[in-house]
Amino acid sequence: MLSKHSASPLNIFTIMTSLATQENAYNLSQGLPDYPVAPELQGLLQEAVTEGYNQYTPMQGLMKLRENIAEELNERHSTDYCSPEIITITPGATYGIYTALTTIIEKGDEVIYLEPAFDCYLPAIEINGGIPVKITLSAADNFAIDWQKIARAITARTKALLINTPHNPTGYVWTQDDWDQLAAIIEGRDIYIVSDEVYDSIVYDAHRHVPGFLQESLNNKVISVYSFGKAFHITGWKIGYCVASKEITEAFKSIHQYLTFSVNSPAQYALAKYLEIYEKGAAASLLQGKRELLIEGLKTSRFKKLPTSQGTYFQLYDYSNISDLNDVEFAKWLTTAHKVATIPLSAFYKMPQPDKIIRLCFAKKDEVLRAAIQQLGKL
Ligand SMILES: Cc1ncc(COP(=O)(O)O)c(C=O)c1O
């Protein structure tokens, strides 16, 4: 079989989602909301089509959308760094990550990434001719970032680091101190950072998202990658954006124009307008309520909660009190025998993991969460 990467041709996310459908299970597996999209956003998409936004938009994206993103980011992070020139609209974050790597790396360059990792990272590095260098973080240490391991992994061939904050699946949100540690490690080296920040607006409690593109100590070598899918519960729209220095943005655009050229026009129009009216912080407070519902509901169960999610749609749980099955078998059994679909932690590693940990997605209707909690509570 032809293959340019070493990841599984059919990943566990796909397997669990189709098993959930087949078993008619409460689906806490894939990271996609099951509740409706804001009516205003639905109306704006219809308006876009009737207003004639049906043809190609400029290659970098609709100016109004880029202006509104820049304004929003500047306001949120108390800066004036962002402008439409350094923002490129993309067909989702997966594309943004891939194209960022295409922009940066040459064949044989090493790219460091941290496991547990979102499933597209490894294939995106390999398809682009890079050599993946993985740093495995351990469940026993609550997935604490091992800076010494990262420092030791850097060689003369290291071209980029691929990081993710807020982190899927652990829910960890990088602090300014984390960024400073990274900057200290790569100081004086010509290393780029691809920073997957798709959950930037979904952070809880007193946690704050610190964006990569604002890190002056990283010498403007960061590409921050975003997705409207997570922020506005529209994962199927597949639309996002990248923020990087002017120089990197120019290089990124030179590839982007030959990969897709233009991104869905009606969606760009709708999002540009929606950014002007939506209630800021609404997604985070809705999801924080759902996180509480799940955590409270499972408090008396035999599932052991790992550190409380600081951001994202996800919470990790240990099931070692319940079963000796490995995580993939356990997740399948839970779906077929108890009608709750989840994702085994091994989905985020190249090799199967010995840990007895599953990821639960709480971006679901309250009634689905309650029904799933009831099932899980019986175990
Ligand atoms: C960490 C992370 N990065 C990227 C993506 C993909 O985003 P998009 O659907 O915009 O490609 C996801 C989706 O689940 C994700 O969890």
Image (cartoon, rainbow, N blue to C red):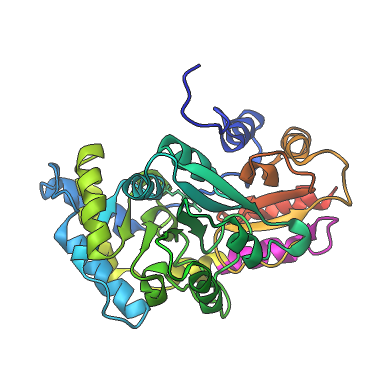
Q: Pinpoint residue 343: horizontal percent, then vertical percent.
A: 66, 44
Q: Is residue 33 visible?
A: no
Q: Pinpoint residue 63: horizontal percent, then vertical percent.
A: 15, 60
Q: Quadrant of residue 85?
A: bottom left
- Residue 65 relative to residue 182: left or right: left
Q: Pinpoint residue 310: horizontal percent, then vertical percent.
A: 60, 69
The image shows residue 187, relative to residue 347, as above or below, that is below
Q: Is residue 228 magenta?
A: no
User: Given the current orientation, which residue lies at the most extreme front position?
Assistant: 156
Q: Please, what is the dominant secondary structure of the magenta stretch?
A: helix
Q: Pinpoint residue 50: horizontal percent, then vertical percent.
A: 13, 47
Q: Is residue 296 magenta?
A: yes
The image shows residue 102, relative to residue 270, as above or below, that is above
Which residues, given as a range, are shown in magenta? Answer: 288-304
- Residue 342 relative to residue 140: left or right: left
Front residue of 219/232: it is 219
Q: Quadrant of residue 147?
A: bottom right
Q: Residue at x 61, y 55 (%)?
A: 169
Q: Residue at x 32, y 72 (%)?
A: 73
